[in-house]
Amino acid sequence: MQFFKLRITVGCVAAAFALTVVAGAASAAASPTEITLRAPLDPFRLVVPFTAPASRWGAGHRGIDLASHLGQQVHAPANGVITFAGVVVDRPVVSISHSAGFVISVEPVESSLAVGVTVATGDVVGRIAQGLSHCRPQCLHLGIRQHSTYVDPLDLLDEFGRVLLLPTERHLS
Ligand SMILES: [Zn+2]
């Protein structure tokens, strides 16, 4: 069952880099510590990529931001159990725990689902709300922790696999 065709807008980054998808990584047999995610929004349009922090508490962007609109349906990227649905500081957050040790969080998302509810990939878990200050005018922040460490969601999204940005030939000596 196919839910979405993923589409990425690289914008000006494409001018300086060639996007190379390491084939095989995505098609390799999944170990118990891996998952493949479905996009939480349709259409899928990346507006801010993941930026790993230099240290545990350092600055970074611990997830990706996707273009969205107020009230848009948000789908579960994977099977799991709702482990949080409520307000964190000033924005509504929904977290889904996956049996392989991943915690998937989406915000700002208002949900009527209760903690403990099981969801399947593609289920609607809520709708885009207002209240996320770090992207305007409206976006969905998708964050994923694997055993408490934030990972790049693009590495886990179906049809992406692990993504590397490499210099184009004109930058190679
Ligand atoms: Zn974000």
Image: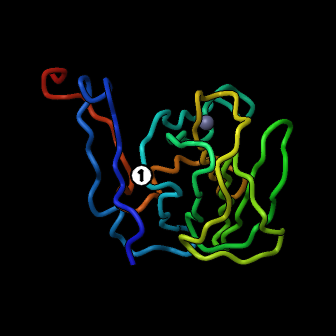
Depth check: give the residue in front, 172 or 138: 138
Residue placed at 38% from the left, 57% from the top?
A: 161
Instruction: Name the residue type under label 1.
Output: Pro
- Ligand 1's image quarter is top right
Residue 154 location, x and y as percent? 45, 49
Residue 127 location, x and y as percent? 65, 54
Q: Quadrant of residue 25?
A: bottom left
Residue 103 location, x and y as percent? 69, 59
* Quarter of the image where the C terminus is located: top left
Q: Quadrant of residue 118?
A: bottom right
| Colour scheme | rainbow
Residue placed at 57% from the left, 52% from the top?
A: 72
Task: Give SS at disc 1.
Answer: loop
* Quarter of the image where the N terminus is located: bottom left
**Where is 97 relative to 16, above or below?**
below
Disc 1 target residue: 43
Residue placed at 46% from the left, 34% from the top?
A: 47
Depth check: give the residue in front, 149 or 91: 91
Residue 160 location, x and y as percent? 36, 55
Residue placed at 19% from the left, 21% from the top?
A: 171
Q: Is residue 9 left or right of residue 75?
A: left
